[in-house]
Amino acid sequence: MCRSAAAVLAVLTALLCAMRQCAAAGRNQPLNYRPIIGVLAQENIPDDQYAHGFSYIAASYVKFLEGAGARVVPVRINRTEEEYAHIFNAINGLLLPGGDVNIQTSQYSRAAKIFYDLALKANDAGDYFPIWGTCQGFQQLSVLTANKNLLTITDTKAVALPLTLTPAQSSRLFRSFPKDLLQSLAVENITGNFHKWSLSLQNYSRNAKLKRFYKVLSTNNDGKKEFISTMEAHRYPFYAVQWHPEKTPFEWVDKPGMTHSPTAIRVSFYTSSFFISEAMKNQHHFPSLVEEERALIYNFSPVFRGINSIFIQNYYFD
């Protein structure tokens, strides 16, 4: 019996070590104080009179990351898997932005899956690589993990809401937020929602793949359905918000759901700072400074689309 118990204990210990490998890899590496985040472009908005080329990135996502101490590389659509693998090995994290493309058939979704698979493989090998998904990016991550679309329609196209938080001490994302800020998140209408599709708590709970992969950090309710508004992966540095922390300081269209209060600005800053702190645990880099310089978004100029546009500035790409 003693030998059997010892064998079982050894197996359990090995499994626990494997589960902690990813997190340990991030902790044991020296921090990278020059992080570069890839932001995935997507197909242009139909009838966008300012568009040129085939794809765009809203400038608010770039500012969101730069304001927390990162640089940005645009990840353009319609590239080969080899090109994406090269970019993956040069950047320190990936942001999947919001938008309005098909998250199963678009070039955005194709590229997202390639990077998602690369990130899974890298993290399993001890190469700490974080992914952040906002709104459409949240939805994309849920589809990639479940291998099916479980989204449902909610009445959340332009509304600011408080978050119904799960215990923050069990969350990597919210753990470092000041208590007063967490309290504000729980009682004030400061998270902007601009989506018609959501991952309902019911659909999440019924899907074994999602439950095994993600921890629910917050939910919201549109009056009829409870949906997940914030989640993070259990074993991987993957984070997703259905709301828009980047809009608060950097988008100015005057419509319901937009909020610019000091508390909302603080939430945006703590959110971006957390993700960049995760990216600092990654040691990827470009083969040369020349290639790095050519890849950075500084080589492109954002286009002003008008103060009342849903995105005030966009970057456009061929």
Image: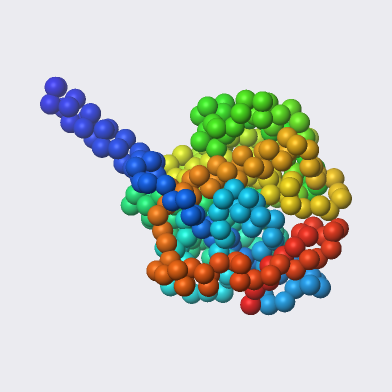
Quick check: can you spot residue 44?
yes
The x, y position of residue 41, in whole percent, is 62, 65
- Reply above or below: 154 against 35: above
Image-quadrant location for residue 49: bottom right
Residue farthest along the top direction in this orientation: 2
Quick check: can you spot residue 195?
no
- Viewer-closest of 34 and 82: 34
Image color mode: rainbow
Image-quadrant location for residue 262: top right
- The quarter of the rendered structure image containing the N terminus is top left
How many numbered circles does the render carry? 0
Residue at position x 85%, y 45% in the image: 256
Q: Is residue 305 left or right of residue 246?
A: right
- Viewer-closest of 144 and 19: 19
- Reply above or below: 231 against 49: above
- Viewer-closest of 51 and 220: 51
Residue at position x 51%, y 29% in the image: 170
Residue at position x 65%, y 29% in the image: 182
Q: Is residue 316 left or right of residue 85?
A: right
The x, y position of residue 196, in whole percent, is 74, 50
- Reply above or below: 17 against 134: above
- Reply above or below: 42 against 116: below
Residue at position x 79%, y 72% in the image: 50
The x, y position of residue 226, in whole percent, is 69, 36
The x, y position of residue 52, in whole percent, is 72, 76
- The quarter of the rendered structure image containing the C terminus is bottom right
